[in-house]
Amino acid sequence: MTEPATKPLRTWRPMAAWTAGILLALGLVWFVGAVVAPVWQTDKVLRDPRPHPERLLVPYERWSSSELKPYVEAVNSLGGPETASNRLSVYLRTPRRIAPHKEKAIFILGLCGPNAVPALRRAIQDTDEGLRCQAIWALSQIGAGAQPAVADLQQALGDESDRVRSFAAEALKKIRGEEAKP
């Protein structure tokens, strides 16, 4: 007499593998939507125009309206000051080989006003001296709206770079509303 065939017991492994696959797919979709797409779109906006990086340290009031127009349009094409600051913040946290236009991103953050202060505060901590100077300069262009960054600027007064210290001193004057002496 043969024994009746028994159904194999169901185990947790197939369900765990299926669940892990779904979670991995959802995580990948989130990563593409939250990081890859915004960085790619932001880089696309930042590609043009391309002035010399030193030109990006000229105060906004010295730019003609036609020179500044592409940057104002960049803020608008990124969704306005608040959305642009968020997207540019993500862009600045991306490695340089993926996000090569960081100077322009910081310049445009200065046009976003107080919304950009958190991203600029992070940029002050960057290892690149040029980016630190650019971030400090952008905070000075925001003026009194950059008050939350005063402690970071005071810390930058102790930076090893003379240039960074100089930018920090000037930014503190502008943010506090003191007149710069000629």
Image (spheres, helix red, strand yellow):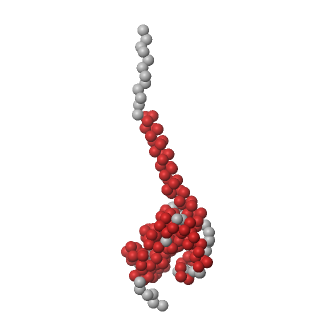
Decide: is 142 above or below 180: above
Q: Residue at 41% across / 86% down in the picture?
A: 178
Decide: is 52 above or below 96: below
Mark yes or no: residue 98 visible: no
**Toward the viewer: 25 or 66?**
66
Q: Quadrant of the N terminus?
A: top left
Decide: is 11 above or below 70: above
Q: Residue at 54% across / 69% down in the picture?
A: 75
Q: Is residue 182 left or right of residue 45?
A: left
Decide: is 52 above or below 93: below
Figure quadrant of residue 180? bottom left
Mark yes or no: residue 159 visible: yes
The location of residue 99, given as percent across then percent down, is 55, 63
Q: Residue at 44% across / 40% down in the picture?
A: 19
Callout count: 0
Residue furthest toward the bottom?
Answer: 182
Residue furthest toward the top?
Answer: 1
Q: Is residue 107 left or right of residue 13?
A: right
The location of residue 117, given as percent across then percent down, is 44, 71
**Toward the viewer: 145 or 35?**
145
The location of residue 15, given as percent across then percent down, is 43, 36
The location of residue 66, given as percent across then percent down, is 61, 78
Q: Residue at 53% across / 79% down in the picture?
A: 60
